[in-house]
Image (cartoon, rainbow, N blue to C red):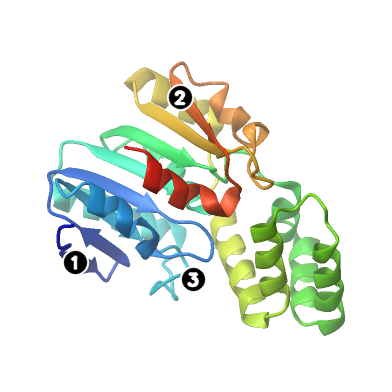
Amino acid sequence: MHNQETHLRRDLFCHIYGKGEHHVWCFHGFGQDHRVFKNLAKKYPNKSFHCFDLAYHGGNLKPYSQEEWLQQILQYWVSLESPSLELIAFSIGARPCLKILSLRILNIQKVTLIAPDGIRNHVLFSFLAGNKSGKYLFDYFINSSLLQNLFQQTVKHLFFLDKNTRKLGLEIGSNINHLKKVQSTWLYYFDFRIDNISLSEYINSNGIEVQFILGKQDKIISKRSISPLFNLLNSKKIELFQCNHWNLLPFWIRKHNI
């Protein structure tokens, strides 16, 4: 196993593994940080992996506004002087990933979307993060121990949840800091929305390779979740694995090439 040299771009909370000329930008999911891609970088020492901490994750506790972040991203890309770029994103990390793709500026060759959030907004997500009444109820819930207890009891008895999702739900419901992290993350990334029709036209006209990775036991992201974009793409790939949502990324990293 080779020794990894890591660099940190503090302004973007981006950890860089490797010094290859082929650049891969990685975006993790909720509750993770840049380290989740470390094993992937070990497999490809001839590439440079730029692993970003999402807003309110890792070291990125006071994130830029969306506009400021996108400006920083563009400046960063120019500074790399790279002819091409590859994007990898898991879960809610697909929101900033797809937003970058929708800029239509960077020379992106390939995108791998692993159980991607943000293609079709979940009803609950839209209500709690994008609706005035929903935001008020979210605040009320966070400050009500009675409702938190009720939430935990409900999660325990939702038969369709897999073990890992149920465990995460119980952890979040029992810790106010976890709840605040969910709220802050959801509110921040709700505005990272895309136009699926416009984005698909750009992808199709530029021959960008798009690969979707889904878990057959995933109760959060399904084929229906990705259909608004997937169905509009002329050329795409999809792989299904015997995984739930939270096991999918590490399983994919262990078993498959990029």
Quadrant of the image occupied by residue 184: bottom right
User: SS for tag 3?
Assistant: loop
The three-letter code of the residue at mark 1 reads His
Asked whether disc 2 touches disc 3, contact meaning CB atoms under 8 Å apart, the reply is no
Horizontal arrangement in the rendering, residue 79 relative to residue 161 (left or right): left
Q: Which of marks 1 and 3 is in front?
A: 1
**Residue at image x 12%, y 44%?**
21
Q: Which mark is residue 56?
A: 3
The three-letter code of the residue at mark 2 reads Lys
Q: Is residue 91 visible?
A: no
Horizontal arrangement in the rendering, residue 150 relative to residue 102 (left or right): right
**Residue at image x 41%, y 38%?**
112
Horizontal arrangement in the rendering, residue 113 relative to residue 39 (left or right): right
User: SS for tag 2?
Assistant: strand
Q: Could you say where residue 145 lies in the image, as x and y percent from the top left?
A: 82, 83
Q: Mark 2 points at which residue?
A: 237
Q: Could you say where residue 40 lies in the image, as x and y percent from the top left?
A: 31, 51
Q: Cα distance, mark 2 to mark 1?
A: 32 Å
**Residue at image x 29%, y 63%?**
14
Q: In this view, does 137 lie above or below 16?
A: below
Q: Is residue 14 visible?
A: yes
Q: Between residues 236 and 202, which one lies in front from this camera angle?
A: 236
Q: Mark 1 points at which residue?
A: 7
Q: Is residue 119 above or below residue 162?
A: above
Q: Which of marks 1 and 3 is nearer the N terminus?
A: 1
